[in-house]
Image: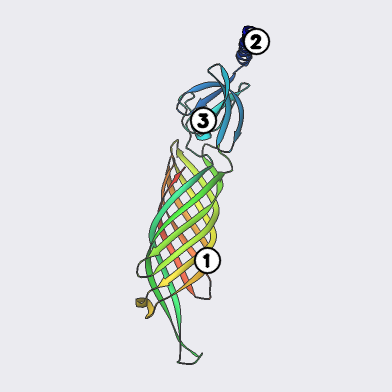
Amino acid sequence: MKTVLTFLLLMFFFLSYGQASKNDSIDFDDVILFTNGESLNCIFIKQKGKLIYYYVLRNGKKTKTVARKKYVYSITENNISTNYSHKRSTQTGETYLMDLNSFSLGLYTGVTEFSYEQEYYTHNSSILQTKRVSYGNLLPVGITFAHKNYFSGKSNQFISGIRYGVTVEVAYRKEVTHTLGLKFGYTGLWKIKPKLGIELNFDTGFGITRWDFGPEFIGYGFDFVDEYILFSPSISLRIKDLGIGIGYSYYYLNKEFRAAKQTLRFHVNFNL
């Protein structure tokens, strides 16, 4: 029994020693530089999506580790450096406005103007007597969740890309509209300073909106669901990941109900 136990202990020792020697012989020659200035020797594996995978030596063992790309400034592999984030790097002195592909969350409000054309008929007749266009103003509250993809992330002056997402809105006063839609379009970023820029967007899209009219609007209450096509330019002041700006939205609605809707909005968005 003692012989077997001694043999097992010796095998465990040699295996452990062999594994430690194997890890010690691995060259952790790649260098990962984080945006907070920390540097780390590693073995770079791959970059996938918003994550970076690499090996580090931890407690004598080769350990696979993952980091978010937005917190990594660069990876140096075989003496070649690749930038993954354009945040400030205290080591190199380079400064960039944050312009990575990213999700963004936006909140907006403003003023919505709508109109509705009503037709009047004689009693028990289909003969049109007159028309009336009624106008009203609503207070919109909306949320937009979108993703930005830039065509180039290394330009020091201007970069362009596309963005796409979903918008949910409720506009109310005496009348109410509920809107749900998809949008996509152009996004551009003009860099004034390292952490300051102007963002230009032009979106189009489509969706549905539900109209709820109270009896005080045209004498009786009613509701209907309408489809729309959206056209929406906007401009924002970007301070790192924060954007503050104004925009305009025109909803080209289904002609069956002869309704029209346009919004002047003030928005705040943040890159996640």
Secondary structure type for disc 1: strand
The spot of residue 94 in percent (x, y) is 49, 28
| Image spot of residue 27 (x, y percent) | 62, 16
The residues tagged by marks 3 and 1 sit, at their Cα atoms, a distance apart of 42 Å
**Relative to residue 29, is residue 212 depicted above or below?**
below
Give the residue pinned by disc 3. 72
| Residue located farthest toward the front when viewing the structure as drawn | 1
Q: Is residue 30 above or below residue 109?
A: above
**Which secondary structure, mark 3?**
strand
Residue at 54% from the left image edge and 25% from the top image edge? 32
Foreground: disc 1 or disc 2: 2
Q: Looking at the image, which is closer to me, 162 or 199?
A: 162
Residue 182 rendering spot, x and y as whole percentages: 53, 57
User: Residue drawn at (64%, 11%), measured in percent from left and top?
Assistant: 11
Q: Badge 2 is on which residue?
A: 4
Say whether disc 3 or disc 1 marks the residue closer to the N-terminus.
3
Quote the CA–CA distance across marks 1 and 2.
80 Å
Mark 3: amino acid: Val
- Circle 2 packing at 10 Å, graded few (<14), some (14-19), many (20+), is few
- Amino acid type, label 2: Val
- Can you identify the residue that label 1 sits on? 228
Query: On the rendered structure, is 236 left or right of 206?
Result: left
Q: Amino acid at mark 1?
A: Tyr
